Amino acid sequence: GENVEQHPSTLSVQEGDSAVIKCTYSDSASNYFPWYKQELGKRPQLIIDIRSNVGEKKDQRIAVTLNKTAKHFSLHITETQPEDSAVYFCAASILGNQFYFGTGTSLTVIP
Amino acid sequence: DGGITQSPKYLFRKEGQNVTLSCEQNLNHDAMYWYRQDPGQGLRLIYYSQIVNDFQKGDIAEGYSVSREKKESFPLTVTSAQKNPTAFYLCASAEQGGNQPQHFGDGTRLSIL
């Protein structure tokens, strides 16, 4: 089955700096890649997603890039704010049948 | 999302006891999922269902059972065969047709007495 690896496991940045989280996947048939943000004790919330026919997608301060050849995708958060502090999960799926999640990145934005 | 309701929020299980976690959605989604989340780990798939009266095992189905008698409901039973049930359980749903984002409930935290 699919294997998704996520790095780093923890990340601390100064407020206003950028944060980058990287994920790799193993199954070249995976074609949908969502990113979720989870605050402590709460539900994961979708923040951005990308499909395999697109190389990059941006939504305000958040962007995701996808390299199908190398089988990796990354989350970029610019101008970080304290409220960006949370755990971020990447995931990969094949036709949406099953979702395979990374182990999460705990992001801390230092004011 | 307000469309997915999990209950209870906290649940305690005694030795040898089966417990059932509820998941209800009013988003008219065909697909529903159960995940287990342990500290420092990602979400691991227990069971999923793409359509009523049908479901498939995920990566860690042993010790769990599900049913899908109605489109809006996907209850998870943690049986006594699950020796380490303490975890945070998340239910999710998604539209069918592939490549649609999952919507999650607020979760149930299960602990052993």
Image: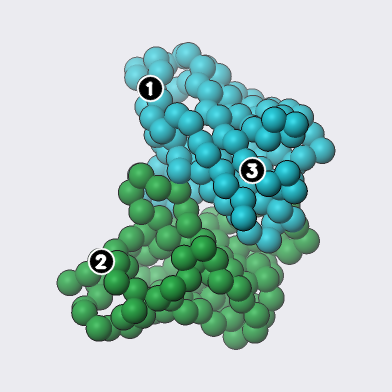
Chain colours: A cyan, B green
Question: Residue A33 location in percent, x, y?
Answer: 66, 43
Are the residues tagged 2 and 3 within 8 Å (C-beta)? no
Crowd tier of the residue under label 2, counting other residues whose Cα lies within 10 Å: few below 14, some 14–19, many 20 or above: some
Vertical placement of residue A84 versus B26, above or below: above
Residue lying at the far left in this picture: please name it.
Answer: B113
As shown in the figure, which amino acid type bears the numbered disc 3? Answer: Ser
SS state under label 1: strand
Q: Residue at x 54, y 66 (%)?
A: B58
Q: Chain of mark 2?
A: B
In the image: residue A40, left or right of residue A62: left
SS state under label 3: loop
Q: Which residue is mark 3?
A: A26
Q: Which residue is mark 2?
A: B111
- What is the count of numbered marks? 3
Question: Residue A74 location in percent, x, y?
Answer: 61, 29
Question: Residue A53 location in percent, x, y?
Answer: 82, 38
As shown in the figure, which amino acid type bears the numbered disc 1? Answer: Ser
Crowd tier of the residue under label 3, counting other residues whose Cα lies within 10 Å: few below 14, some 14–19, many 20 or above: some
Q: Which numbered circle lies on residue A12? A: 1
